[in-house]
Amino acid sequence: MSRNRITAGPGTVVCQETELRGEVSIGAGTVLHPQCRIIAENGPIYIGKNNIIEENTIIFNKNAAPLVIGDENVFEVGCYVEGSRLGNNNVIGTRARVLGNTIIGNHCVIGAACSTEVNETIEDMTVIYGSQPNRRTQSNVLPGQATLHFRHLDYLREVLPKYNHLKHLETV
């Protein structure tokens, strides 16, 4: 993909040091920390609403098909995401890796330094953890999780502009 086409919804916070390449659409309220990289090499990347993408995260689409990311996900420091679809309310842990055309459901956790298999489908509520890595299914969603996520977003929207220059992107 040779040209950049970057769009952002209202209320997004994108730090100047963020690298955005290719066709990237960022949903309303999403926060991109400094030094993260969103690279749509061949196909577009569509990021949903109210996601948190932390430092040194790489979201990379080398396929012609779109990489679609749902709403209210957290991508922690230094994680690497390929994949073809991520649902809503997931946590991709510090230095975790989502590989190939992996599909991740909703309310999943890929733990710190854990990795998916290449091209696998991860069902809703799955937790990948430990050095093996191990897997289990969550029994229910924690009731306070959504409130905590939105408090985290509010804090980042207040603090990041105080200490970082922001990109001014075309809004949709």
Image (cartoon, grey):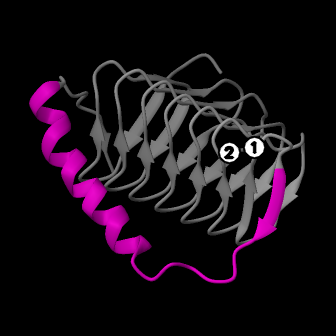
- Residue 97: x and y, percent? 72, 36
Is 102 contained in the magenta span? no
Tag count in the figure?
2
Segment colored magenta: 134-163
Q: From the viewer's perspective, is the residue at label 1 or at label 2 nearer?
A: 1
Distance between mark 1 and mark 2 Cα atoms? 7 Å
- The amino acid pointed to by label 1 is Gly
Point out the residue furthest to the left here.
162
Q: Is residue 108 left or right of residue 151?
A: right
**Residue sitting nearer the eye, 73 or 27:** 73
- Residue 82: x and y, percent? 72, 36
At a point 69% along the width and 35% down the height, the residue shown is: 43
Q: Earlier in the sequence, mark 1 or mark 2?
A: 2
Residue 67 - label: 2
**Residue sitting nearer the eye, 118 or 94:** 94
- The amino acid pointed to by label 2 is Leu
- Residue 5: x and y, percent? 47, 30
At a point 80% along the width and 67% down the height, the residue shown is: 136
Residue 83 - label: 1
Above/below status of 45 relative to 69: above
